[in-house]
Amino acid sequence: MKKVLILFAVLAFVMFAQDKKAPDFMLEDLEGEYVELADVIGDGPVIVSFWATWCKPCVEEMKAYNKIIEEMGEKGVSIVAISVDSEKSVSKVEPFIKSHGYDFTVLLDTNGEIARKYYAQTVPHSVLLDKDGNIVYQHSGYKKGDEIEMKKEIENLL
């Protein structure tokens, strides 16, 4: 009986996690303009990455994702980096992005509302969306090599 319940729970999770429409949102970018999720989906896969300037694994993941965008951006792959820095540390986001030369969409979620919608309880937390805005892959945390799995997932969508 216990095995049946575990199997049912795993199947339910897989069904829920695959091809689930991503919750829409509208957040402010670094220039003070509002960006809606619907504005960034449609051309190809989108990595939605929840991160913070104070998070060392986030910094490493951002470097890895930037390489993916450099390699695959012309194929329609993009990234939306959502900072969950609080009101106290949000002033560090723009200098951090500029100092690393990142050229992707950076949004601010200072109250964590959007992170909660995506069940991003820890950072970094990444969500891969297909061109239709469906969640096809999620991952929390970062260790060197995790970007390889993300890249494989992206390649499956292209």
Image (cartoon, rainbow, N blue to C red):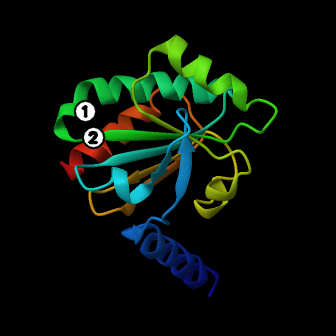
Q: Is residue 38 above or below residue 103?
A: below
Please indicate whether residue 73 sits to the left or right of residue 66 in the image. left
- The residue where tag 1 is placed is 73
Residue at 54% x, 11% y: name it: 99
Q: What residue type is labelled 1?
A: Gly
Q: What residue type is labelled 2?
A: Val
Q: Give percent across and percent down for residue 139.
A: 52, 48
Point out the image quarter for the N terminus. bottom right
Q: In this view, does 11 lie above or below 30?
A: below
Q: Residue 157 carries which label?
A: none
Residue at 36% x, 69% y: name it: 19
Q: Is residue 54 visible from the viewing direction of this image?
A: no
- Nearest the viewer among 36 and 112 is 36
Please indicate whether residue 49 sits to the left or right of residue 155 in the image. right
Res. 73 image quadrant:
top left
Q: Give percent across and percent down for residue 48.
A: 46, 46
- The residue where tag 2 is placed is 77
Q: Is mark 1 on a helix, strand or loop?
A: helix
Res. 71 image quadrant:
top left
Q: What element carries label 2?
A: loop
Residue at 60% x, 83% y: name it: 5
* Cα separation between marks 2 and 1: 5 Å
